[in-house]
Image (cartoon, helix red, strand yellow):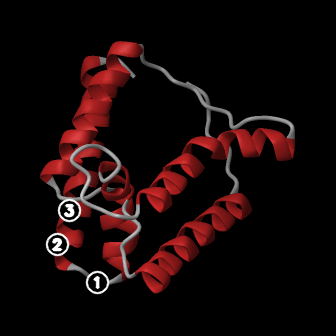
């Protein structure tokens, strides 16, 4: 398993940009910068009239690695240790979790905690505990990861 490189300045800059974008989204649009909510409104039956803004937000998420490649000359180092089946199952479980939890890590973890939302505090503790338990089981009991 590859070691994770410690990058405090890059991590700080990335966190600051995420925080700034969440603040600007709330300030300028009066909306929470929750990725699952933004993306889900692009799919039928989308209820929002801000389709262009939502599409631009999601497009920015998709194009960000290419921007890193263009500006630095190398892409982000990503190691995927599971196959396509594991990725599909993981994606479906995360999608189900965002529906059941009425939000995602960005909506609850970044924006909800910043607003001291009790519902978001419960959601964050729940999905972090679930992630830790799942990682422990897969790594130490099943031996998959």
Q: Position of residue 88 (x, y in %)?
A: 32, 22
The residue nearer to you, when weighing 125 against 15, is 15
Q: Position of residue 135 (x, y in %)?
A: 32, 35
Mark 1 crowd level (few <14, some 14–19, many ≥20, 10 Å Cα): few
Q: Secondary structure at mark 3?
A: helix
Question: Which residue corresponds to the image point at 34% horizontal and 26% vertical from the top-left?
Answer: 139
Q: Reading the chain from its start, which is encountered first: label 3 or label 1?
A: 1
Position of 9 relative to 65 (above/below): below
Q: Position of residue 112 (x, y in %)?
A: 31, 74
Task: Determine whether, in the image, residue 130 is placed left or right of residue 6.
Answer: left
How much space separates mark 3 and mark 1, taking CA atoms? Answer: 12 Å
Q: Secondary structure at mark 2?
A: helix
Residue 34's image quarter? bottom left
Which dot marks residue 116?
A: 1
Which dot marks residue 14?
A: none
The residue singled out by tag 2 in the image is 119
Q: Secondary structure at mark 1?
A: loop
Question: Which residue corresponds to the image point at 20% horizontal and 46% vertical from the top-left?
Answer: 97
How much space separates mark 1 and mark 2, taking CA atoms? Answer: 9 Å
Task: Determine whether, in the image, residue 51 is placed left or right of residue 90.
Answer: right
Q: Quadrant of the N terminus?
A: top right
Task: Determine whether, in the image, residue 43 is placed left or right of residue 72.
Answer: left
Q: Position of residue 47 (x, y in %)?
A: 24, 59
The residue singled out by tag 3 in the image is 123
The residue nearer to you, when weighing 45 against 120, is 45
Say whether marks 3 and 2 touch (CB < 8 Å): yes
Residue 95's image quarter? top left
Q: Is residue 136 visible?
A: no
Q: Quadrant of the C terminus?
A: top left
Q: Is residue 5 visible?
A: yes
């Amino acid at each position: 398993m590859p070691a994770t490189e410690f990058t405090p300045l890059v991590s700080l800059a990335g966190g600051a940009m995420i925080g700034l974008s969440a603040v600007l989204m709330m300030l300028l649009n009066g909306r929470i910068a929750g990725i699952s909510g933004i993306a889900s409104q692009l799919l039928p039956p989308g209820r929002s009239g801000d389709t262009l803004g939502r599409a631009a937000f999601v497009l920015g998420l998709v194009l960000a690695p290419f921007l890193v490649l263009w500006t630095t000359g190398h892409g982000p180092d990503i190691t995927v240790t599971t196959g396509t089946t594991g990725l599909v199952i993981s994606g479906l479980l995360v999608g189900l979790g965002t529906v059941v939890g009425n939000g995602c890590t960005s909506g609850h973890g970044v924006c909800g905690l910043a607003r001291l939302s009790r519902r978001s505090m419960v959601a964050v503790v729940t999905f972090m505990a679930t992630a830790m338990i799942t990682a422990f089981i897969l790594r130490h009991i099943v031996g998959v990861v």
